[in-house]
Image (spheres, rainbow, N blue to C red):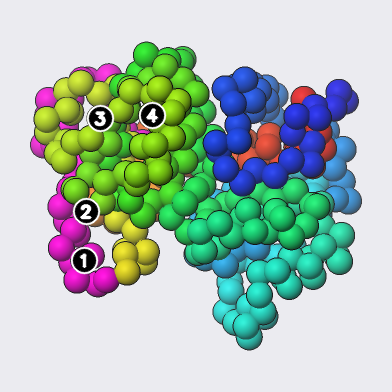
Amino acid sequence: MAKNFDFLGRDVVSIRDFKRDQLEHVFESVDALEKKPKSLDAGLQGKMVALLFFEPSTRTYSSFQIAAENLGLKVSGFSNVAASSVSKGETLYDTIKMFEGYETDCFVIRHSMMGSARFAAEATDVPVINAGDGSREHPTQAMVDLYSIRRDFGKLDGLKIGVLGDLKYGRTASSLAYALSNYDVEICFIAPDALQIRPEVELFLNQRGTRFSRETSLATVANTLDVLYVTRIQKERIPDPTEYERVRGLYQVNLETLREAKPSLKVFHPLPRVDELASEIDGTEFARYFNQAAVGLPLRMALLNMVIGGAD
Ligand code: NCD
């Protein structure tokens, strides 16, 4: 197997660290896997990945777990903090050092603290994959999102992409915006003022010369979009419960709000959804979110294969 040293042993902490050709390389590797899923002999038998999930997760944890098992990796770690020594006060640093001692070959870490993945990557020479650090980033979700959009449209360049919801506390929205800055797209951030995209993301997009605008209502732009990426309000990250009460229910995507949309519009959502995306959309041609979630598996297989095995 040819080794791809671009990814071998590499940390995946921020999607900002990945340029267009590297993202394309990941996507091509997923394409290859999707075409011939059984052909993969990753040569990773006996290696180990530690999944350290300090925050709840359904899709990210289980897709990493299944991906690792499909590659023949041993899986260790925890998804239930209450049942681990973290509940006794063990620190992230000590937890990493522990699993380093057990000779893990890769860490996948989700933690509520912004910057925790970077902190972890500095604490160990073993590659660290960020599975979500507070409201900051979720790089593998951004890869899933881009891959899904690219698969549906056959391209990313030229698309107008609306990103709706809690853009302030949601990490998927910021990672998606960073990733899209590698392409010739137009982004429209749609959110109530209190939940608009963070200044650091705007600054980054300005530096990259990415075209973007801000809107408070979907209605004004719905008919111009190719893609609508919906996110839930991150209740657990809003520091003040009265602030949450003020913003909850401020937006919902349903058939009525999509009345003016292009028939070719595709709706994505990183999931879980709460009440911001009506289930009446599920049976329509707009809905792509369950297909998007399914991409999590081959994409994380491809990525683990590249990071641990150096696969091309
Ligand atoms: C997201 C997350 O954890 O940031 N979920 C996911 O990984 N697909 C989105 C969310 O929790 O709203």
| Residue bearing the label numbered 3 | 213
Circles 4 and 1, Cβ within 8 Å, touching? The answer is no
Q: Secondary structure at mark 2?
A: helix
Q: Nearer the viewer, mark 4 or mark 1?
A: 4
**Left or right: residue 39 compared with residue 216:** right
Ligand 1 within 8 angstroms of badge 3 C-beta: no
What residue lies at 22% left-to-right and 53% top-to-bottom?
Answer: 194
**Mark 2–mark 1 CB contact (< 8 Å):** yes
**Does 126 sit left or right of 17 as displayed?**
right
Q: CA distance from mark 4 to mark 1?
A: 29 Å
Q: Which residue is mark 4?
A: 206
In the rendered structure, which disc, 2 or 4, sits on the residue that comes first in sequence?
2
Q: Quadrant of residue 39?
A: top right
Q: Vertically, is 3 above or below 241?
A: above
Magenta stretch containing residue 242, yes or no? yes
Q: Name the dominant secondary structure of the magenta segment.
A: loop
Q: Earlier in the sequence, mark 2 or mark 1?
A: 2
In three-dimensional space, the C-alpha distance between marks 2 and 4, rounded to whole angstroms, equals 21 Å
Tell me whether the residue at label 1 lies in contact with that at label 3, contact meaning CB atoms closer than 8 angstroms: no
Q: Which residue is mark 2?
A: 194
Is residue 292 visible in the rendered image? The answer is no
* Mark 4 or mark 3, earlier in chain: 4
Circle 4 residues within 10 Å: few <14, some 14–19, many ≥20: few
Magenta span? 240-268
